[in-house]
Image (spheres, rainbow, N blue to C red):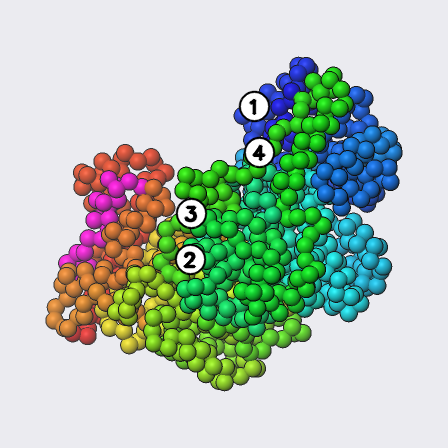
Amino acid sequence: MVKRTYGVRRISEFWRLTGRTFRTGGGAPVTEMRIFHAIGTARRHALLILDHAERSCVRRSFAAALSAGVHPRGRAEAMRRQSGKGQIPSKRTTSEAALVAQEPAGAQGAAQLNPPDRLLALQRAAGNAVVAQILSRRGREDIFDRARNQRLAELGRIRQDGAGDVRDTVRELGRQQAYSATPPPNAERLVAELPGMPEPDRLKALDSLNGEYRRWLARNKEFVDSLRACLPPKEFAKTAAYLMVDLDDRVTSAPSARQEARAQVEAMLQDPDTTGRLMMNRATVMVVPKDVPMTAVSAFHHLAGTHTHTGAGGGRGWDDVRGSGGRHAAVTEENLLGDHTTIGGATHYEGGYSTTTHEFAHTIHDYGLSDDDREQIARRYQEKLTDPAAVWPDGSDPRNYSRRDDHEFFAQLTNAYLGTNHGDDPYSGERRNNGPDWVRTHESGLLPLLERVYGAASAKGHSRSANPVEANAAMYEGFRDFWSSVGEQQHARHGSAPHPPPLRPARSSTGLPGPNRTSPPPKAPGPPRAGQIKPSARPELIGLLDDRARSPHRTAFVALVPTTADGPELADIANRYRKGFAGEGPDSNRFGLVLGVNSWEGREKALEKVQAKIDTFRGQWNKKNFPVGVVGFVWGNHKVREAKDIGQDTIPYGEIRQHIMKQPVVTQLVNHFTDTGSSHVYLHISDSDTLSFMTPAGPLFSEAATRHLGTDDPPDLLSGGYTAGADDQRMVKLAVKLDLAVRKAMADVDPKLVYFPEPNTFVKVRTDWGMDGLEDGIGFGSGKEEGQNLVDSLEKVRSAPVTRVFDPSLAISTRADRIGGKVQAFNGGSVTKDTLRQLYNLAQTHARPQEWSDRIARVHGTGRDVLNPLSEAVFDIPEPGSLKAEAARQPHDITRAWAEKAELRDALQAMDKKSRNTLLKIALGTRKALLNALLDACNELSTSA
């Protein structure tokens, strides 16, 4: 019996495409086994190269086969195997031949049949000699020769470019395979002619294009508008499904999965307005192979190694998640076809439950529905939360999944309406509610919206039931019978088809789903986050957005600012940003602002106050001004029971910033700036208490673009820090100045050592990778220290090294009373060491021994046996009278003095030379900056006294 593991299949495919023969099973030639062993410990690396390289190299090298109407991984392989003597096609090969060849003798129409009937069609097709004649032997050899040569040439170029480590090579290939869109050849002709073609010709033409070309067409406004004008709604929906659905090359049953994905997406695109918005917002659907992690697919590489950040996600690792909503919806091969997976613990979802419709409903919610539609859904969700007797799509138990938030509510309601919500809720164990009749009874208010978007309920349903796990079990049995029927000799050679996994995962003794369930979500929820966000007003964009004018600037900015309902006037916040630009201020093609107006949910009339704040601004902001997006919401925290509990430790800063950053208006602005000619787009993280954007170097945004962000290779991160405002207490001002000096000294050695503060940090949107917002997995975390969480997640998600710059000449002015509460005022008299030591008491300062040591240990892993005595020496405060002399000392004099401290000397000598030199460079720079700042503070305090 052949042991056909995933890895062996992949290696076999690799050697086949490079002109080698590789077989598995008994009697394998010694030379072939030697190839296998030669791979040895590099086997995993070979698989990684194949997974990532073939999507770029092989796809291009097979262009000739595609143009001839041949799918090289399906039909050509089927022909090759079926033309071999005495070989019985595998299950995959037979399926590919039956569905791709479309010959009348048995295979035609097999894709439309139910699994048992399709089995009979496949059996008939297996003996169809016509299939083997479609592609000549010479044609096959030419195709694979070109594939081999182009692959070897590309891998050779990678090696020549200096990618010594395979992991580096894979990362580079992952960056090259960004989910991009490329204009197809003769793009103008396609845009002009495709809408007027007969439907079969149009779909055939779209099918011949690769995913990058189809995505470009789907994003072309002229093309989409022409389709809407020329086509009836149902034909527009089918064409849109062809444009939006794409498959990873490793999907096992590609024709079946493609057909099923398109059918399900088409059924959910019955409203042309919604469909048009989806395409203009660049929404797509990617089919993930059944035995490949979602994060190994090019569209989702950036999620590898990260975890979900939403309450609904439960903190799951993206590597194990089987499906995702968002702009690029991930749907899985196993759920489309009722198959099984080896990824993520459980083998499959319950039969009849569709993750495809669930995930695509998320995409429709965020990128297809109108603001009024989203507001209606949010309002209905809030109404149900206040009703203790409410019945939800997933049951009446308060723990049910559809009660998590308004997005999960709408996705599960969509499943119920479409009849794809079979099975039990993973949290409560209750049976889910399913079917349009239930929706009519319990959600009549949302029924018109569902009917408009998805069509009348009577027309719902698929050509076969969603996720047909049970039906496919019968197909496995049929295949076993099929193998038996071809004779004992062949049966012994190839072995019987594997038994499918159990149809239902085991249930625990409590009756609730066991731990291997993958229904959304597959695990019990993780620990509660610091806060929950509840939208209270629909996002809106106020101001000018001129799509006709081209921007003369290379760099554009979207500023994200949280503010409270009781905080400054929104118009005052917006007007301050004018001072951040040279001349008369920013134009609408270079700058946009998004304000997140929020309040604690327990405040009296919190929702009304948030809305009143927004209404006031709407009347004040001239529509000729730069665009301002306004988002209203309230937040809650289980630790806050009354207003006096609100403080630094209970405000969910991270969740608030994350909610603002993920708003559709942010995406709209980024796309607008990209479409009007900006090469780089940056998000600017700021606060409402910023006093001025005039920095020591000049207007913040203009100077940032000139110095750093408008170059050919700008950094991922830039911060200038902040200084205190004119009205802040004098000692607080000096403490902030000391902190900024120490940060600069540390950043001069290694920018990773510095905390990039929330009030003034720029983050690059990778528009060059096709992104129109920060990648999923990049965020502000939970609670406070959101700046550090942002940088950490950026490092984790982006495969390339994250470049960063800290430039204090770009420091903005902000109110510092919030962080200066522990700095005692100087009331005159003599300046002492205790007076200067007060400058160490600023919150979030780097000018404090413990914080300084912690940051070095975090980045460089330096031990406390070195850092403790070294930080004591660095932050030692001399007598004020000797400050000038100490500040003038040379570095070698300082190190000689430190060498006299036995504990410090021994700890430094125990380090390797490179690490010791780096640490001393940080310490000497910090010491010099500290002494100069202390000297300036002493002189200023003495003069004022």
Whether 158 is drawn above or below 607: the answer is: above
Mark 4 vs mark 2: in front? 2
Q: Which of pointers 2 and 1 indicates the residue nearer the eye?
A: 2
Q: Who comes first in sequence, dot 3 or dot 2?
A: 2
Q: Are marks 4 and 2 in contact (CB under 8 Å)?
A: no
User: How many numbered tags mark residues here?
Assistant: 4
Residue depicted at x 47% and y 51%: 430
Alpha carbon of mark 1 to alpha carbon of mark 3: how far?
39 Å
Residue 872 part of the magenta-drawn span: yes
> Would residue 818 be seen by someone viewing this image from the given angle?
yes
Asked if disc 3 and disc 2 are in contact, CB closer than 8 Å, the reply is no
Nearer to us in this view, 174 or 722: 174
Q: Earlier in the sequence, mark 2 or mark 1?
A: 1
Give the structural element (helix, strand or loop) at label 1: helix
Q: Nearer the viewer, residue 295 or 571?
A: 295
Q: Which residue is mark 4?
A: 501
Q: Is residue 409 above or below residue 466?
A: below
Q: Amino acid at mark 4?
A: Pro
Q: Secondary structure at mark 3?
A: loop
Task: Give the crowd class for mark 4: few <14, some 14-19, many >=20 residues within 10 Å.
Answer: few
